[in-house]
Image: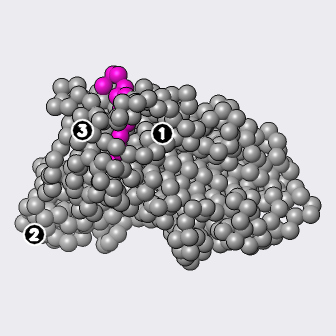
């Protein structure tokens, strides 16, 4: 969806929506019918059931299994209800108890298990949604009480969300931390979406076998997630995946031994035989390489030692912003064998270390580079005997700084003068063009379409981003108050309006509503006009004038952009920051009402 706001003139409109009520609502928390999650009949949930877990100051020490089936139209949903300060309800595995009516195996593998059970009767869990929960505390030395009343201890690879098997799972807006693995998904899993989660602080000290996320599924998409560093002293990767049909898009991935470790499927012939196993898509992400850990930022191929299982396909790596703060050498990519390929286009690869500290591959494989911005002085490999190939397919740029708005504040949006602007190349036919961008944190907005030329990196140049930093200071991209649809001065005008009308978002009452008027040319006709303040270009906005004869049916009349006005209206004052006027060239017949919508392009 585009980020937009409408000025309604004369009357505001109400919208009606038809809602399908869930079969049964279960409400947990202070003042609710159920005090604890253990009182929810997890063994009896059915299609459309929703469990609402309300925030409370004390964490819920409870664990359970989901072994039930929803439907596509009526999924089973477990939903956290935030507190007054936006806090998610916390579910802790530390000293957690288990509902006595449940009976399931591998209880020591997770806080929330999705998979097999004896009670309820075993089935393939499907059409499940887990959202809005803060799940933590499933690792040694923490312990819990099982359904039979006996004590148990978590194993090293226990997870906040442990998926043993599933069909059609969404994990959304959750925090997964302080576990062996934040998220673990086993091979008998299909069609998984991990969206808008914060996954950080997992792993075990001195171990490389537990990760923030460790997944193997047939079809999995990661989007809008914030991956933070693992626990101190832990050597795992940030996102380790063995899936077919992998898409990693619009995420912030910072820290870990490697940021991305995309290796072979160890547990499923079905996954290895899928056509989608041979392609992975990584685009629109911000990847940040820290000082510690492996100098390899991305690994693609395999690590089992059974090379016949390796991916041996193509990693499509495009429109990412990759930043390393290491003081020494950096490796963009490890391709496991010469049969692995990476097609890298329109990425920013920036290192704070000077010239000569960036290699493209460590040894094997084929890397094709086109339209990337690369730190000056990069080399194909530090290994003079490497067998791999780096193909410079043209249009790559080099420099010492790509044109970030504020590197120190991690605002990697581009300045107007950035070298990366309008320098991207056409994407491969098999890829999905990026339409969104990651917004700190766990949010997104529309990638600008203000011009047809592609910018390099995860962010398209957006004048609003420049204005946002000017008005709200360094790191404003991480401030909800600086969002386009926020209203920090509480005057009813959103930031998008303040930007579009060239007013102060921190000064109440500075925006004036658009003004309709009549123009009389002297020939006996009258023409309607709409006047409004419009900031000087480039602004990356569309000012969309809509008209209605009855305040019921609205027609899009004219769109004013950096390119001018279309179709067929008369525009005056060309965006100087003063009043611009759009005039209807057709004579007025009857009544005409106006509204003005502002839209980021």
CB atoms at circles 1 and 3 under 8 Å apart?
no
Disc sitting over residue 108 in the figure: 1
Q: Position of residue 194 (x, y in %)?
A: 44, 52
Residue beneath disc 3: 40
Instruction: Say which element carries label 2.
Output: loop
The secondary structure type at the circle numbered 3 is loop
Percent position of residue 67, x then y: 33, 52
Location of residue 175 in the rendering, given as x and y in whole percent from the top left corner: 44, 38
Residue found at the very far top of the displayed protein: 57
The extreme right residue here reads 384
**SS class, disc 1:** helix
Which range of residues does the magenta coloring cover? 56-66
Q: Is residue 383 above or below residue 227?
A: below
Q: Viewer-nearest of labels 1 and 3?
A: 1
Residue at mark 3 to residue at mark 2: CA–CA distance: 63 Å
Q: Residues within 10 Å of mark 3 (few under 14, many from 20)?
A: some
Separation (CA) of disc 1 from disc 2: 74 Å
Q: Residues within 10 Å of mark 1 (few under 14, many from 20)?
A: many
Q: Is residue 132 above or below residue 281?
A: above
State which quarter of the image contains the N terminus: bottom left
Tell us which disc is closer to us: 3 or 2: 3
Q: Nearer the viewer, residue 98 or 205?
A: 98
Residue 378 in percent (x, y) is at 82, 56
Q: Of label 3 and label 2, which has the lower sequence position?
A: 3
Residue at 60 percent of width and 63 percent of height: 265
In this rendering, the label closer to the viewer, 1 or 2: 1
Instruction: Kindly identify which numbered label has been placed on residue 589.
Output: 2
Alpha carbon separation for disc pair 1 and 3: 21 Å
Q: Any mark on residue 229, and which?
A: none
Could you say which is closer to the camera, residue 70 or residue 416?
70
């Amino acid at each position: 969806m585009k980020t937009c706001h409408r000025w309604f003139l004369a009357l505001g409109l109400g919208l009606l929506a038809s809602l399908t009520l869930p079969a049964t609502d279960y409400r947990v928390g202070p003042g609710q019918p159920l005090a604890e999650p253990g009182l929810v009949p997890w063994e009896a949930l059915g299609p459309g059931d929703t469990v609402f877990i309300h925030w409370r100051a004390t964490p819920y020490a409870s664990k359970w299994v989901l072994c039930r089936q929803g439907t596509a139209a009526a999924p089973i949903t477990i939903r956290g209800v935030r507190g007054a300060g936006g806090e998610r309800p916390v579910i802790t595995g530390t000293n957690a108890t288990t509902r006595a009516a449940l009976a399931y195996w591998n209880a020591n593998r997770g806080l929330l298990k999705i998979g097999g059970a004896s009670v309820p009767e075993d089935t393939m869990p499907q059409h499940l949604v887990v959202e809005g929960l803060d799940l933590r505390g499933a690792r040694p030395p923490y312990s819990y009480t099982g359904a039979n009343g006996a004590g148990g201890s978590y194993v090293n690879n226990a997870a906040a969300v442990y998926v043993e098997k599933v069909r059609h799972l969404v994990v959304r807006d959750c925090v997964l931390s302080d576990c062996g693995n934040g998220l673990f998904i086993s091979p008998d899993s299909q069609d998984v979406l991990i969206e808008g989660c914060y996954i950080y602080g997992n792993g075990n000290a001195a171990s490389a076998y537990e990760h923030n996320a460790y997944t193997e599924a047939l079809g999995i998409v990661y989007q809008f997630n914030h991956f933070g560093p693992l626990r101190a002293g832990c050597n795992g990767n940030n996102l380790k995946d063995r899936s077919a049909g992998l898409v990693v898009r619009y995420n912030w991935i910072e820290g870990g031994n490697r940021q991305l470790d995309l290796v072979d499927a160890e547990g499923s012939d079905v996954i290895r035989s899928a056509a989608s196993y041979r392609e992975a898509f990584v685009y629109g992400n911000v990847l940040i390489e820290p000082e510690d850990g492996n100098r390899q930022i991305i690994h693609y191929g395999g690590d089992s030692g059974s090379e016949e299982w390796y991916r041996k396909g193509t990693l499509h790596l495009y429109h990412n912003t990759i930043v390393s703060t290491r003081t020494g050498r950096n490796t963009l990519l490890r391709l496991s064998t010469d049969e692995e390929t990476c097609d890298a286009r329109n990425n920013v690869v920036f290192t704070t270390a000077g010239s000569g500290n960036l290699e493209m591959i460590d040894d094997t494989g084929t890397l094709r580079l086109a339209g990337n911005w690369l730190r000056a002085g990069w080399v194909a490999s530090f290994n003079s005997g490497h067998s791999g190939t780096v193909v410079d397919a043209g249009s790559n740029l080099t420099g010492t700084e790509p044109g970030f708005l504020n590197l120190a504040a991690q605002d990697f949006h581009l300045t107007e003068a950035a070298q990366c602007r309008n320098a991207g190349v056409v994407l491969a036919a098999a890829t999905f063009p990026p339409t969104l961008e990651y917004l700190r944190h766990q949010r997104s907005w529309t990638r600008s379409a203000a011009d047809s030329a592609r910018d390099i990196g995860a962010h398209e140049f957006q004048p609003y981003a420049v204005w946002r930093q000017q008005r709200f200071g360094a790191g404003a991209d991480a401030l909800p108050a600086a969002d386009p649809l926020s209203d920090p001065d509480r005057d009813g005008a959103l930031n998008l309006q303040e930007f579009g009308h060239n007013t102060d978002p921190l000064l109440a009452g500075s925006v004036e509503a658009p003004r309709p008027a009549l123009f009389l040319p002297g020939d006996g006709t009258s023409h309607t006009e709409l006047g409004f303040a419009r900031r000087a270009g480039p602004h990356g906005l569309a000012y969309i004038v809509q008209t209605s004869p009855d305040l019921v049916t609205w027609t899009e009349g004219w769109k004013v952009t950096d390119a001018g006005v279309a179709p067929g209206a008369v525009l005056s004052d060309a965006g100087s920051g003063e009043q611009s006027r759009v005039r209807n060239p057709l004579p007025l017949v009857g009544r005409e009402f106006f509204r003005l919508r502002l839209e980021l392009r």
